[in-house]
Image (cartoon, helix red, strand yellow):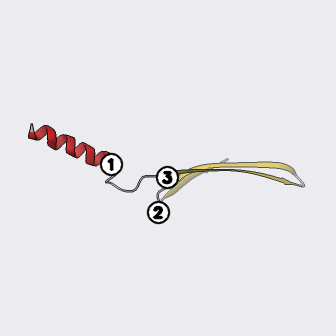
Amino acid sequence: MKMIALILGLAALAACGANGPPLEPNANVGLSVGSNGVNTTAGIGASNGTLSVGLRL
């Protein structure tokens, strides 16, 4: 019984994000009008403060 409680406790600790802050998703969309016509931009990414990854379309 103690072993099951220990395993469940460790699983709960691992699931709560104890290994670091979670990544926060972000997105943006842009529209611009100029002499070349209408241009659109879009981007998606994720950041946790020190690390940031993204994709710009």
Q: Mark 3 points at which residue?
A: 24
Q: Do the residues labelled 3 and 1 touch (CB within 8 Å)?
A: no
Q: Residue 50 carries which label?
A: 2
Q: Distance between the residues labelled 2 and 1?
A: 20 Å
Q: How far apart are marks 3 and 1 (CA)?
A: 15 Å
| Amino acid bearing label 1 | Cys
Tag 1, which secondary structure?
loop
User: Which element type, helix, strand or loop, lies under badge 3?
Assistant: strand
Q: Where is residue 42 in the image (x, y as percent from the top left)?
A: 68, 48
- Image location of residue 46, percent across then percent down: 52, 52
* Residues under numbered marks 2 and 1 in contact, where contact means CB atoms less than 8 Å apart: no
Which residue is at 46% across, 63% downward?
Answer: 50
Q: Which of marks 3 and 2 is nearer the N terminus?
A: 3
Residue 43, how many percent across, how many down? 64, 49
* 52 versus 16 height, above or below: below
What type is the residue that disc 3 sits on?
A: Glu
* Amino acid found under the numbered disc labelled 2: Thr
46 vs 11: above or below: below
- For label 2, count other residues whose C-alpha is less than 10 Å away and answer few (under 14), some (14-19) or many (20+): few
**Mark 1 sits on what residue?**
16
Of the two numbered discs 3 and 2 in the rendering, the one whose residue sits closer to the viewer: 3
Q: Residue at x 46, y 57 (%)?
A: 48
Q: Residue at x 42, y 52 (%)?
A: 22
